[in-house]
Amino acid sequence: MSLVNSSVEGVLEPILERYLRNPHHLMQILRETQERLGFIPKWAVDYISEALALARTQIQSVIEFYAFFYDSPCGKYRILFSDNVTDRMQGNTALLARMLSRLGLSQGQVSGDGLVSIDTTSCTGMCDQGPALLVNNHAIPRLSSQRVDAICTLIKNQTPLEQWPSAFFSVEDNIRRKDVLLSAELTNGQALQRAIELGPQGMLAEMKTSNFRGRGGAGFTTGVKWEACRNAPGETRYVVCNADEGEPGTFKDRVLLNSYAELLFEGMSIAGFVIGASKGLLYLRAEYRYMLEKLQATLEARRKAQLLGKNILGQKGFDFDIEIHMGAGAYVCGEETALIESLEGKPGRPRIRPPFPATHGYLGQPTVVNNVETLAKATLIAQNGGAWYKGLGTKLSTGTKLLSISGDCDAPGIYEYPFGVRISKILEDCGARNAMAVQVGGAAGTCLARHEFGRKIAFEDVSTSGALMVFGNNRDMFEVARNFTHFFKHESCGFCTPCRVGTTLLCNLLDKIADGKATSYEMNELSRLHQLLKTSSHCGLGQTAWRPVYDTMQKFRPSYDRRLQQKDFEPAFAMDAALAPAREIMERDDADAHLGNEL
Amino acid sequence: MLSPQEPPKRKLRVATTSLSGCFGCHMSFLDMDEHLLELVELVEFDRSPITDVKHCSAACDIGIVEGGVCNSENVHVLREFRKSCRTLIALGACAVNGGLPTLRNGLDVREVLREVYFEMPGVVSNTIPNDIELPLLLDKVHPINEVVRIDYFVPGCPPSGDAIFKFLADLIAGRTPRLDYPQMRFD
């Protein structure tokens, strides 16, 4: 008991103090507790429950909701292989098997000595340099057999993570094409100074002149959102940056956070200035944990330079500061209301909209939620003016778009193009010579076949949050859709039945097709389910989870058909094998104790 | 010439059965009260607990199945229905999803049998019945659409008499069956 008490004091008190015993910081308290202890033990839950005056069940529900919180020991080294379709194409399956056999483990199992566990996780945003894994939430890209073997040795020798070769953890930016954003050369504070000179209304006018639309996917006009928030009644206001870049195949925000964080933080400050907020929150996905210290150092430097804090740049009454909030492995938190729930220390379940965050957001106050790229570009608009920005791109989609390109091409990485660029041009630039299909906008996006490569990236044509995965001639588009669908099943938050059950049913049907046990009946069921998910899911996750299946069924139908049995129907399970346990215990083996598979 | 008002030339043959269910859906069927009189003008019952006919005749028009599939006999009955009936309907939660009997799906069926026949208070026999006439349990309980092709699903535990009547009336008249919100409310 005294041992437990001293651990409680030693471990939890400093963390609780740092977060001022504020229940809204529950996720950060749990994350730091886990970083110290490897998992979140029951006694820690009890202690935190007492300290924050939260019910144990509330804390438990948060731990259970997020994939990266653990309530039981999961190995001193916790290895998670990224399992996006691009990782699969780069050979992660063989590397996972290699590591499992080297360490004598099976997937999901913790080694007997509690040293290591190995499993898979959703896309970690390293598609341009995969296959990738996370070790204790730190990313290791560019895996090869040699690298896997070296990691096994480090684990067996119990080398502390800090002493692993730093080359393992180096993540490349892979910027391949720069346009106005990526080639911007701004002095820190320059754009913010200009926004202050314009005044909040003036800056807002520039945003509206630019006709700039949000880059997170939905494409809402940013100036209108800011104005709605500015005009909404409230005690205080917040700026939230959505850096929960979980859409498979997307990694542009990773590069912006790594090399253009000043632009982002300046954009957040400008947004804060316009709407009258004094606090900004950056919601950083858990997979990008490795950037936390660097980002915090950038914030600290900006505070020193009077770009954050009180009376910014000498402007009396302009107080603004930014906090970083780490996620814990939940794709659904990319949805803005789920993200706000998560910021408040709760499970990330999407809220019912309206009301929209612009009027009722973080802690019920007017809140602007913008994507990383959106906020970074707001800095450019402050600097160069709305009219300048409006001249770029197309009439309905002004400016440029960052694309994260991965898959079957010579030069995967980040490409910045003015809106209106054709898919064929992009494929030529990235060296994708034998592309059969392009998945634009991630798993929830659009699958384009070759006859559509003349289409343009723009809100009015092919809209995207920034992912572009290329599939060459030899790829199996059925397997691509199956990978994405399993991703949605895993990430469904479970709140609404159509999505929770629907994504599982989709997976069951696809798995049955993959096993060669399906008939045209399953194809009809897939069509029926797609309607149901689309029309009755609570949030965007369920409303789009059918898309990869639907698109590939339309455009790559033979990849389904060649797996189908030419029969009316085939049962979902092996009939005779299902009687085996009963045969065993009833000691029967007569004809009636067996079942054929035929009607 | 056919007129749209012309009634069906012959009565449709309807077969019903309860597999791994509680007969609640059949009770609800009877609960359609005076609609039963309208129904018997349009249909005649084939294999059904109502008639006690033991097997389906070769050409039934409509088969109505209550309950999920928990043992080999359920499989045989369901297959007979599929073979004999032009249109097969899953009636109620257990047929549609497996329902309450699927609560055993998380357990090993051998453990379930041991528990029931050895461990339960008051059990004296200490053998698991293994008469050749007894159907064997499947390792898991399944919704019926995992064993045969099903044409329609009517949710509810049980679906109300009104819902069942509305559904059948639509089907018999050649309208795509549709249950409106009041018939789909279960609270």
Image (tube, coloured by chain):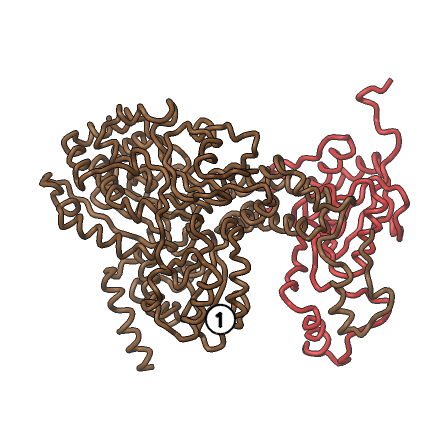
Chain colours: A brown, B red
* Residue under label 1: A110
Left or right relative to A378: residue A339: right
Q: Residue furthest top?
A: B1
Q: Give coordinates of residue A418: x percent, y percent.
A: 37, 30
* Numbered disc 1: secondary structure: loop
Question: Is residue A260 placed above or below A214 in the rendered structure?
Answer: below
In the rendered view, would you say B49 is above or below B70?
A: above
Please report the residue visible at 85 percent of the width from the left and 37 percent of the height from the top: B12
Tag 1: Cα neighbours inside 10 Å, few (<14), some, or many (≥20)? many
Q: Nearer the viewer, residue B128 or A579?
A: A579
Q: Is residue B147 visible?
A: yes
Note whether residue A538 is visible.
no
Left or right, A410 with respect to A27, comes to right
Observer-nearest of B136 and B64: B136
Left or right, A455 with respect to B145, comes to left
Q: Position of residue A392 (x, y in %)?
A: 33, 26
- Quadrant of the rendering where the N terminus of chain A is positioned: bottom left
Position of residue B108 measured from the top left corner of the image (x, y, whole percent): 67, 69
Find residue A203 and report its horizontal and vertical position in percent. 21, 30
Pick the front one: B142 or B90: B142
* Front residue (pair A340, B104): A340
Q: Residue flagged by tag 1: what amino acid is it?
A: Val
